[in-house]
Image (cartoon, helix red, strand yellow):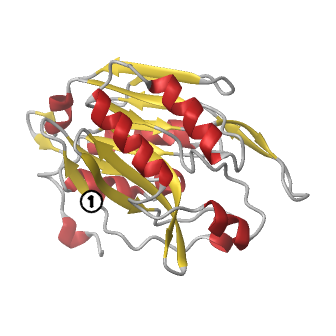
Amino acid sequence: MKVGYFQFEPTFGNVTDNLDAAIAKISSIDCDLLVLPELAMTGYQFTSQEEVRRLAEPVPEGLTTQRFARIAEEQSIYIVIGLAERDGHHIYNSAVLVGPHGFLGVYRKLHLFFEETLFFSPGNTELSVWNLGNIKIGLMICFDWIYPEVARTLALKGADILCHPSNLVLPHCPDAMVTRCLENRVFSITANRVGKEARGGKQALTFIGNSEIVSPGGHILHRASPDQQELTIVDINAEEARNKAINPYNDLFGDRRSTMYGW
């Protein structure tokens, strides 16, 4: 199957323009599964809760989910998109999954990073795996990478691919995702953004790009540049993620001694 990411630089607050640009870029691509960055259509560096609430959308009724659902149906593709989700009095840093038959689900980020803690509620959705027919995928968002429990839980639930929308500013994640794949024998697709944001007198945030697709063996199948827009699609064999044998004597999950771990 063909999987990919779209690394780009959204203009803060211009949801409609960002949507138009992203959809124009991915229209007519030959791909089965595509991942876009965290908060892909709003930008990242919010300055107030009022601003977050104004830009957040309900799921699945909101503009971002509906427009990507249409393009997913038209192109028979699965797409993962990061967005700010409004649900009653709560705002979540979320990722939605849409496909050929519409909206499939939402994941709300469990581990908030830095000033996200000022603007978003901690996620309350279960770490879930979606069966897309010939593959199973799990969703995680950006800073979730630093908690190995997230990737391990998704892998134990059967995920072949970890879809990882991100707005990375720390340098460690791209290499850490190699470890997450190796220790779980899964694929990962990290879709990061590029550019800078410096709003409301705050220190500028520089996003590191380096979106990547990693194999179950820890091989980087493709890593993007740190500062350029890039749409990348690669061929993978998802069945590689279902072989947990390390050698004839060791099985990655069969050898787990969970009663000894204390959690």
* Image-quadrant location for residue 105: bottom left
Instruction: Give left or right: position of 225 versus 145.
Output: right
Q: Is residue 205 visible?
A: yes
- Secondary structure category for the residue under label 1: loop
Image location (x, y in percent) of residue 254: 11, 52
Instruction: Give left or right: position of 97 versus 129.
Output: right
Q: What residue is rendered at 48% in x and 38% in y?
A: 36
* Image-quadrant location for residue 160: top left
Answer above or below: position of 71 versus 255: above
Q: Nearer the viewer, residue 250 or 214?
A: 214
Answer above or below: position of 10 versus 228: below
Q: What residue is rendered at 31% in x and 68% in y?
A: 126
Q: Nearer the viewer, residue 179 or 33?
A: 33
Kind of residue indicated by mark 1: Ser
Q: Is residue 216 visible?
A: no
Q: What residue is rendered at 56% in x and 65% in y?
A: 112
Which residue does the numbered mark 1 point to in the structure image? 128
Image location (x, y in percent) of residue 149: 36, 61
Image location (x, y in percent) of residue 228: 66, 23
Q: Farthest residue toward the right?
A: 201
**Total number of numbered discs in the rendering:** 1
Image location (x, y in percent) of residue 232: 46, 21
* Image-quadrant location for residue 193: top right
Q: Farthest residue toward the left?
A: 248
Mark 1 neighbour class, 10 Å CA radius: few under 14, some 14 to 19, many 20 or more = some
